[in-house]
Image (cartoon, coloured by chain):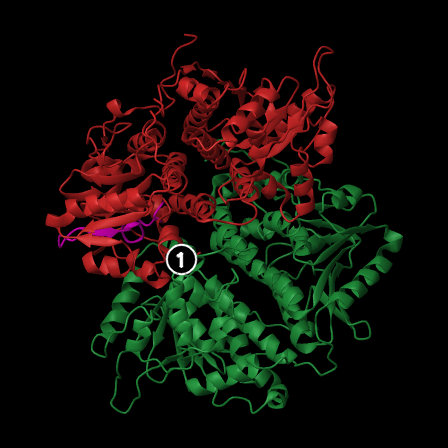
Chain colours: A green, B red
């Protein structure tokens, strides 16, 4: 039935009244929000496992991701966020093992990636938005449960004689902590690497004083004092927050309007066209018709304001495509609209110290990083009528290649232009902290300087090519063949080799904890998940919970 | 038969008169060495393939590694090294595909690692030893052949209308360039990442002017002018070399004396004991009986001088064990001797600007990095009679854990001590440029400062524990059980999970091109080598050369 909702595509949209696993409490007076985890055992996103002991699956993280984002937009006065649980002596047992054991390799990898992006969003909220996260571990935090705590600014652990923090993946499951635990132990918390080795091989975990001495947690508190300690730490976090005090109203993140068919995913500002024969998805982002008149206008428009709506829609489309359409290996990225309106919107956002403007820029930053971390070939097609300017030009620089038409298809068209602006020179850094232009030009600072100096100029294909901003500038006669050949070539290569190659090239230049997690941990995890020692019939993931020990091929690779 | 030479263990020792694939020519007057590649088709290190078109296997790289090292020690006056080939229009076709297709997964991974370490040694010779490498590509450099060129300081390509540089791994073989090609393109040469994408997906490669414009090579020359251009560039490289001019004699790297049995590998200063039941190898490094009296004494001793002999032996032992004993998953590292003699030797080496002293320090640096990159659990056992001081203390800090006996086993023993010295604070950096102590303490600069301030003090177990320099300090009653339990525990874990965990923790902190290659590329390559798209019956590696196209599972992961 044409126009039918395809049920295979997961939805990433939710809102607090629909949460099944989290409860969001807002204490306006204290400027503190609390997210309470209590997973619904029968609330798995697919059948086949029970979410006991606050173990999680993708659905739990979709809600967490929504909560983190919503706190930034809808509750601007919140300055500290407490993560805790309502279970007795159990904060979170980590990813559900039954879910992992039954999942396909590609799902496991995408699931870890989505969780990692959510944890990065928690750290970003703390460092960039002044919503400082505190993990109040009222019980054991194991595996991914402890990794969730590690993403917080501080960790408080109950000292009840039994609750532990633990990373039991290596000893029990034969896999790595999959959401950045090892990197955050050493690089973020300064845990000595030999102690990290002991910790990550101690299945039963570490509690109380020792967890404190090893820097695994920041504070411990007896059960009778735990709530008071949590309140006090939250108060200190709120006081430490760099967030400008605001009593303005937040923006309600109303549900996205998304209309799906077999071959299209259509939002207000973003349209995705799927071509299964060519193995492509074409993402078309519509630019704003005009910039908001001023900040009051931006606030009044709220979730309908173009820059916020477009970023949310693009973010949602990326996640849907990643999970639901693994065989569409090449994404073609197009824009349509008025470059001047994009640049005017950028100017309003970047030129103010308004909290909403900052949040919108931050959402674009994270959405672009989600694109960087997507295991698909990304090709920007810059054609007449497009608006690759400022923030939207960043889409082109996130792509693996940029093709720009030299000339026009029809005589009544104006040639495409590419226009750089302030958004390309700082506010939207990639995961390593550098701008995408700096990564593009690498050690060649002269080329970077020339590109930045061209900001504001409407660059034709020839000018953009001269500055090294595009890969190729075919004319209208060559364009269809060049694009078709490129798509066919990409479809003929090994998808695994492309994924590895693109990850290496996109994460060129300096590294950060975030690039190590997205660019390196992913690779190790891909490998380990695939090995018989983890996923084979006698592997640890398959044997877990059966009472039988895993059987390993003992050879070191 | 006891004492029999076990033939399964590869030898990593060779010398120019035994080379089958390289010719070393020294032009003393010009201070230029030339390494000419001409692989012997029937000279494979194991049967089953022919080394045509200057394709290589491990044996070719063992010779190259020997040549790079020998030039530093035996030819101190050499200031520039030219890599070229004697074949017509073919510099090097890369790793032999038949060899890769017939090799086990673990061999492929170890092979790539050894090649990567050799390429790092070429860059280290250029930057630290003033032996500046020049790739004179008299013909096509494809795949690993071009990656060998990328390790050189400059690349000259013949402009003969047909010779190309190429990275055909992704389009032809479904794997990644395995020896750092992608990282060196962007991070070292500043090739734009979109052009790197085009280049690494263009099977036929890129020649002449375009290779120059894209920064894939530094210079091109017509065939008639190629030799003159090579000589001129070598002359400029020699002039640019920072090597202090020396007319002193070099040190002859005489063959190592290595006596192997089924369960031991015995050198003069290094002894390895294999325990197959416990799955351990115990490496025992004997310290010097006394330091050389002075530099003249060091030069006179040459290859017999303790610091040079011990480093060469340890380096050789690491490589042998990696390839031949994959099931011995834990290495126990011990030392025996006089700590004062180690520190006196360190003082002589570090306190001079003598070229030989610098070369010996450099060899220790590279040997320790080889240990860092070894996929085995490394445990330092610090016992009475040991000499973990200065350079040898670095062995302990390279390990994943450090166990130090608190007390003595027998009343006539003195307790073990750990002594830091200048060698722990700079001259032996890990691959990311930081000292191992800095990596150990991470963001905790106070702990690092306290440790460095304790240099020169003989630290007992209690003092070393207080400073965070050791993991555990059992007494003589607990020691045997603790060590036995640790070894048994390690043997019970998934070898793959341990490899991934150790690599993450050892490469904590900042990253460099070298850590990206050893720590990240290895992971991607491990994964890709294992995927059916590469290594399955219809995968690209298996189908290569059969005339049949590979069949891929098109799903992106």
Q: Of A455 and A247, which appears nearest the observer?
A: A455
Q: Position of residue A386 (x, y in %)?
A: 38, 82
Q: Is residue A492 above or below residue B316?
A: below
| Circle 1 crowding by C-alpha within 10 Å: few under 14, some 14–19, many from 20 | many
* Horizontal side, residue B476 vs residue A372: left or right: right
Q: Is residue B46 left or right of residue A518?
A: left
Tell me, yes or no, whether the highlighted magenta stretch contains residue A376: no
Of residues B473 and B538, which is closer to you in this image?
B473
**Location of residue B89 in the rendering, given as x and y in whole percent from the top left corner:** 15, 45
Direction from residue B278 to residue B84 in the image, left or right: left
- Quarter of the figure with the N terminus of chain B: top left
The subunit carrying tag 1 is A
Quarter assignment of residue B502: top right
Dot 1: element:
helix
Against A226, residue B232 (above or below) is above
A425 sits to left or right of A84: left
The number of numbered badges drawn on the structure is 1
Q: Would residue B175 be counted in the magenta stretch?
A: yes
Name the quarter where the C terminus of chain B is drawn. Answer: bottom left
- Residue A254 in view in this figure: no
Q: Which residue is mark 1?
A: A505
What main secondary structure does the magenta stretch of the protein show? loop
Residue B123 found in image quarter: top left
Measured from the top left, where is residue B69 in percent x and y?
36, 31
Residue B103 x %, y %: 33, 34
A370 relative to A89, above or below: below
Closer to us: B69 or B301 = B301
Report the span colored magenta.
B159-178
């Amino acid at each position: 039935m044409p126009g039918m909702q395809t049920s295979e595509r997961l939805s990433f949209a939710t809102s607090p009244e629909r949460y099944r696993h989290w409860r969001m409490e807002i204490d306006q007076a204290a400027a503190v929000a609390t997210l309470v985890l209590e997973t619904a055992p029968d609330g798995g996103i697919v059948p086949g496992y029970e979410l006991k002991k606050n173990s999680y699956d993708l659905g739990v993280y979709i809600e967490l991701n929504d909560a983190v984002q919503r706190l930034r937009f809808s509750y601007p006065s919140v300055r500290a966020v407490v993560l805790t649980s309502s279970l007795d002596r159990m904060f979170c047992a980590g990813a559900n093992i039954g879910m992992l054991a039954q999942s396909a390799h590609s799902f496991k990898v995408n699931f870890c990636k989505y969780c990692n992006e959510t944890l990065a969003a928690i750290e970003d909220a703390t460092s960039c938005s002044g919503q400082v996260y505190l993990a109040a571990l009222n019980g054991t935090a194991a595996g991914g449960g402890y990794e969730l705590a590690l993403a917080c600014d501080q960790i408080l652990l109950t000292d009840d004689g039994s609750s532990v923090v633990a990373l039991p993946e290596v000893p029990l499951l034969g896999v790595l902590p999959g959401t950045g635990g090892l990197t955050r132990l050493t690089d973020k918390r300064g845990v000595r690497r030999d102690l990290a080795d002991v910790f990550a091989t101690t299945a039963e975990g570490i509690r109380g004083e020792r967890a404190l001495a090893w820097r695994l947690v920041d504070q411990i508190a007896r059960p009778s004092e735990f709530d008071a300690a949590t309140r006090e730490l939250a108060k200190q976090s709120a006081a430490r927050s760099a967030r400008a005090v605001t009593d303005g109203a937040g923006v309600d993140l109303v549900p996205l309007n998304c209309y799906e068919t077999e071959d299209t995913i259509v939002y207000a500002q973003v349209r995705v066209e799927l071509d299964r024969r060519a193995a492509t998805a074409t993402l078309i982002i519509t630019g704003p018709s005009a910039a908001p008149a001023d900040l009051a206008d931006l606030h009044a428009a709220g979730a309908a304001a173009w820059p916020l709506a477009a970023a949310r829609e693009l973010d949602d489309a990326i996640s849907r495509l990643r999970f639901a359409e693994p065989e569409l290996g090449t994404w073609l990225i197009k824009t349509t609209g008025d470059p001047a309106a994009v640049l005017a919107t950028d100017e309003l956002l970047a030129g103010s110290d308004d909290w909403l403007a900052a949040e919108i820029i931050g959402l674009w930053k994270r959405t672009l990083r989600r694109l960087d971390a997507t295991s698909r070939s990304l090709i920007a097609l810059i054609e007449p009528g497009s608006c690759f300017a400022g923030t939207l030009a960043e889409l082109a620089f996130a792509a693996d290649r940029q093709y720009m038409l030299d000339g026009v298809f029809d005589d009544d068209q104006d040639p495409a232009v590419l226009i750089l602006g302030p958004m390309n020179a700082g506010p939207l850094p990639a995961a390593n902290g550098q701008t995408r232009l700096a990564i593009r030009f690498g050690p060649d600072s002269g080329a970077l300087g020339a590109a930045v100096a061209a900001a504001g100029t409407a660059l034709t294909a020839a000018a953009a090519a001269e500055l090294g901003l595009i890969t190729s500038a075919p004319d209208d006669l060559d364009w269809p063949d060049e694009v078709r050949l490129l798509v066919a070539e990409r479809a003929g290569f090994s998808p695994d080799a492309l994924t590895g190659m693109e990850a290496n090239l996109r994460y060129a230049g300096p590294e950060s904890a975030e690039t190590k997690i997205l660019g390196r941990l992913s690779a190790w995890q891909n490998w380990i998940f695939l090995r018989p020692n983890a996923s084979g019939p006698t592997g640890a993931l398959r044997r877990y919970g059966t009472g039988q020990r895993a059987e390993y091929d003992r050879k070191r690779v």
